[in-house]
Image (spheres, rainbow, N blue to C red):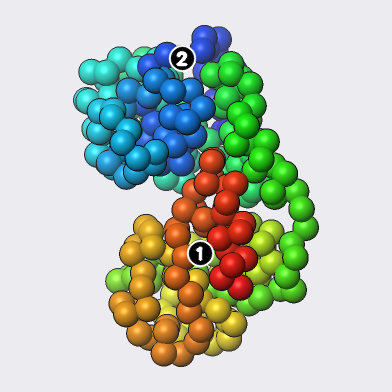
Amino acid sequence: MYDDLGFDLGSVTPPRRVVSLVPSLTEALALTVPGILIGATDWCTHPAGLTVKRLRGTKNPDLDGIRELRPDLVVANQEENRRADVDRLRAAGIPVWVTRIDSVPGALDSMGRLFSEVCSVGVPGWLDRAQTVWKAPAQFPPLRVAVPVWKDPWIWVGAHTYPDDVLRRSGAHNVVTASRYPHLDPGEVLRHHPDLVLLPDEPYPFTRDNCPELSSATRTVCLPGRALFWYGPAMVDARKALTDCF
């Protein structure tokens, strides 16, 4: 059995003890296979009230804590987690399933494989609903947008990323095309004359007050970061959350 990066995990039986190092995957697993999760990162905020062992962050997971839990499987993501941590867990004999999510179709396919092939529970209802939502064509003419991810230093959503594809399929054109997540000063982005700058509340908690260099120069709208960055169950309502901003 191969993960999204082509790593052969061999013959994997349906896991009963899973550690998730990705907030989106944590929510998807907790809602789809209740009771399977035994560990997650501090950033795994959904579903609310999840009671599992907390294992620090996506970039600095508590590897000793994970080993002590003796999971059947760890789920990770190529972009959110470090290759070195995945290698160390595998070296300790712990199977790690790594996802690669660069687009909406890629997210839907990856989630489908995780639940059908790995967990052996079939396609969950929320995934069917998400597929229906994202199959429909965009209802809006292209709107030029930009999306910051972080400040000090400033980082932006760039091309060939999951949020970039979410924007495009929702009827928006991302004016930042330099690279995946380029470091650009606000002035460099504003020179592309976006019609709108979307201010997500995560991973950086953007508000109009904490980025006056943007809100004073162009139209800005705040939105939940889950709509842009979270795949899994969040995909069901993400498109409406975005188009409501347009």
User: Does the rendering let one see residue 57?
Assistant: yes
**Quadrant in the rendering for residue 3:** top right
Q: Residue at x 44, y 37 (%)?
A: 27
Say which quadrant the C terminus sits in.
Answer: bottom right
Q: Nearer the viewer, residue 174 or 125?
A: 125
The numbered disc on residue 15 is 2
Q: Residues within 10 Å of mark 1 (few under 14, many from 20)?
A: many
User: x, y percentage for residue 134?
Assistant: 70, 50
Task: Examine the rendered structure and indicate whether residue 74 appears above or below residue 26.
Answer: above
Q: Amino acid at mark 2?
A: Pro
Q: Is residue 112 left or right of residue 41?
A: right
Provide the residue designation for mark 1.
Answer: 157
| Residue 32 x/y as whole percent | 51, 27
Label 1 secondary element: loop
Which one is earlier in the sequence, the residue at label 1 or at label 2?
Answer: 2
What type is the residue that disc 1 sits on?
Val
